[in-house]
Image: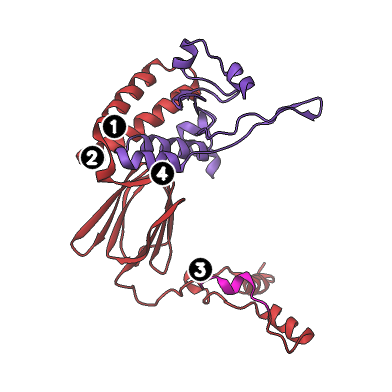
Amino acid sequence: MFRRATTGILARTIRTRLFSTDLSAAQTIDSAFAEAWKKVAPNLDPPKTPLSFMQPRLPVPSAIPSKLTVNFVLPYASEISGKEVDMVIIPASTGQMGVLPGHVSTITELKPGVLSVHEGNEVKKYFVSSGFAFIHANSIADIVAIEAAPLDQIDSSLVQKGLADFTQKLSSASTDSEKAEAQIGVDVHSALNAALTG
Amino acid sequence: MASNAAAPFWRAAGMTYITYSNICANLVRNCLKEPFKTEALSREKVHFSVTKFVDGNPQKPGYRFGVKIESQFLVSCFLTSELVYKNYEEPSVCNGCSAFGLRSADVFESM
């Protein structure tokens, strides 16, 4: 009964997957390529491969860092790039989520809501339409959204009108797809409303 | 494990995440204050041309002006750029234009 126990244990320890905190820092040079190149053309420098253009992933620090690095990008601009802040509150689909430095690695989908970036005493708020947030083990948070606007760029009369329109559409919708569209409209406009008034 | 998870309402209605996300983004853009709104809408404008093929031969290519195609469900009228809520099968004109007797087929042919 225990004859194969040792083989099982040995095989498992060799092939266990590493946690993200145990991985070594990412490579910047493809060493196999560089070796092969040197054999063939020792006098020429090897050409740069995509790996060397990428910035290596920062290693996970052993102590929890004091600041969170935030990258907030939109398809047409990067709103916040590498800024060190104290906390961000992101509108995850499961509710408002506060992210402090040292937060556990998480990937969440965002719902339409307010993203607030807290740095010292100042708070910057953006309304995010939808997107994803990736929080890495090394206290870097990447937030991607399709459309985001600071709260003061939102027109509340248009929001009220939209909310009324879509509530009416929702009650008069017949097909599934119309209902879904109307429901999305109601959700987004009520989130906008809550953001403006809350 | 995920096969028993409740699908979000939009996926149950046959919409993909991308269309859902684009619809949300458009609704937010339409609620912006004036100078930001026109910038945002012009940023998302799409220019395309449509070439119909008949019996393997390309016909004269269609229009080439900028028309927003937001998603499968929201299309802009060719003439007035008003949003028309439709399932996108054929390009369409808005209620205002159809009230004037303009049909999308006519607009299409005149290009």
Residue B1: % across, % down: 54, 45
Q: Which mark is residue A159?
A: 1
Q: Are marks 3 and 4 in contact (CB under 8 Å)?
A: no
Q: Are marks 1 and 2 in contact (CB under 8 Å)?
A: yes
Q: How much space separates mark 2 and mark 3, taking CA atoms?
A: 41 Å
Q: Amino acid at mark 1?
A: Val
Q: Which residue is mark 3?
A: A19
Residue at image x 24%, y 45%? Answer: A152
Mark whose residue sits in front, 2 or 3:
2
Q: Amino acid at mark 2?
A: Leu
What is the residue that sits farthest to the left in this orientation? A121
Instruction: Tell me the subunit letter for badge 2.
Output: A
Is-magenta flag for residue B81? no
Write the start and end of the magenta stretch as one range. A47-55
Q: Which residue is mark 2?
A: A196
**B93 to B45, vertically: above or below:** above
**A95 to A87, vertically: above or below:** above
Colour option used: by chain
Q: Which residue is mark 4?
A: A130
Q: How much space separates mark 1 and mark 2, taking CA atoms?
A: 9 Å
Mark 4 / mark 1, whichever is N-terminal: 4
